[in-house]
Amino acid sequence: DVKVTQSSRYLVKRTGEKVFLECVQDMDHENMFWYRQDPGLGLRLIYFSYDVKMKEKGDIPEGYSVSREKKERFSLILESASTNQTSMYLCASSTASRDSQPQHFGDGTRLSIL
Amino acid sequence: GEDVEQSLFLSVREGDSSVINCTYTDSSSTYLYWYKQEPGAGLQLLTYIFSNMDMKQDQRLTVLLNKKDKHLSLRIADTQTGDSAIYFCAESPLGNKLTFGTGTQLKVEL
């Protein structure tokens, strides 16, 4: 079974702090994704990566950056946290293919910015 | 642009069938997916259908695809309390990216 592990289930940080959310997958997947989930808005893609050291902006990248130094690890960084970044953050991975492959998700990190 | 729409809520009685509907916009999507999210958890892949199929059945789950109308549905037979969750449909318009709907909260009442 694919295992996608997010380092924290719950996190509370203060406005202006630099926040790191970590995600690790154990299936040697090429693709990794970061989403945020808000009520009534579904999942919105923040950033994704198709390979080590590669990153591409998703639909809502403002205020975020990412790092992919190793294939299995994809980090989401909030450079200066703000209250509107309070949300559920979900990491996913998938194998590379010409056709879309299902994404496998971690359990999420519920982040509160005070 | 891509847009996937779902109704926000559905309530059914235990033992009845549930039908969750989804409309999508991108006719080039290769696969269409259904995910389930239980409270406090991530998304779990339930099933998916290839775009050249009309129907796929997997135990209590039946997926119907009307490609002409860009309409996807998920039918859950004999709905149980353990089926209470949020259900997301997703399309795959471009490469390896998915576009998700807003999710349908299914509530199963005794």
Image (cartoon, rainbow, N blue to C red):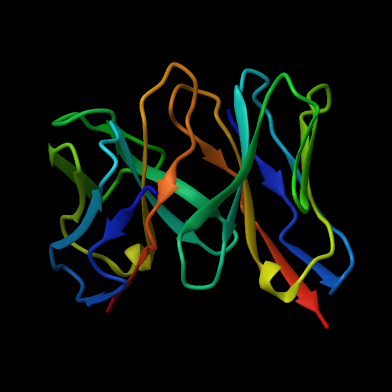
**Residue A71: percent from left, percent from top:** 17, 37
Q: Residue furthest left?
A: A69
Picture residue at 33% right of the left edge, 63% below the top: A85
Front residue of A34 and A3: A3
**Residue A101: percent from left, percent from top:** 47, 30
Front residue of B3 and B30: B30
**Left or right of A91, for residue B59:** right
Picture residue at 56% right of the left edge, 55% below the top: A41
The vertical placement of A45 against B108, above or below, is: above
The vertical placement of A48 against A3, above or below, is: above
Picture residue at 55% right of the left edge, 64% below the top: A39
**Residue A24: percent from left, percent from top:** 23, 51
Picture residue at 69% right of the left edge, 67% below the top: B83
**Left or right of A77, for residue A92:** right
Q: Quadrant of residue B55?
A: top right
**Left or right of B50, for residue B57:** right
